[in-house]
Amino acid sequence: MHYWDFLGPLLTRAVNLIFPSGIMPADWTEGIIYMIPKSDAQCDGVSKWRPITLLNVVCKIVEKIIAIRLRHVLSSIIHDTI
C-alpha cells in the first residue's frame, strides 16, 4: 500500500458519497473490452483471441465492500440447500 497515504482519503471520500444515494457514477461502471491473443500462435481467427474487460478500480473496490457486507447476511436470507 505504497500510495495509501495519498489515495486512501480520496477513495474513502468517493466511496462514502455513493452509499447514501446508492447510485454509482456511470463512468465508474463502464468497462473496456480488450482482446488479447491466447498464445503465440497466429491470431487469424476469433477463437485465437481472449476478451478481457478492464474496469474502473474504484468500481471494483465498491463491489468488494458490498460483497463483504452481504456475505454476513446472505446465510440468513438464502437457505444452504439451494
Image: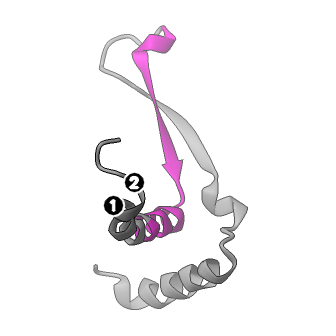
Question: In the displayed structure, would residue 43 be above or below residue 31?
Answer: above
Say the numbered circle drawn on residue 78: 2
Q: Are marks 1 and 2 in contact (CB under 8 Å)?
A: yes
Q: Which residue is mark 1?
A: 75
Q: Position of residue 71 (x, y in %)?
A: 35, 64
Picture quadrant where residue 37 is located? top left
Q: Is residue 17 above or below residue 35?
A: below
Residue under the image location 62 percent in, 77 percent down: 18
Q: Nearer the viewer, residue 45 or 21?
A: 21
Give the residues drawn in magenta, as a range: 45-66
Residue 24 in which image quadrant: bottom right
Percent position (x, y) of residue 38? Answer: 35, 22
Q: Residue 61 sits in which quadrant? A: bottom left
Residue in view at x 29 percent, y 43 percent = 81
Label 1: state its secondary structure. helix
SS of the residue under disc 2: loop
As drawn, the label of residue 31 is none
Above or below residue 20? Residue 37 is: above
Type of the residue with mark 2: Ile
Quadrant location, the N terminus:
bottom left
Judge whether residue 65 is colored magenta. Answer: yes
Q: Residues within 10 Å of mark 2 (few under 14, many from 20)?
A: few
**Residue drawn at the location 64% of the way across and 52% of the way down:** 30
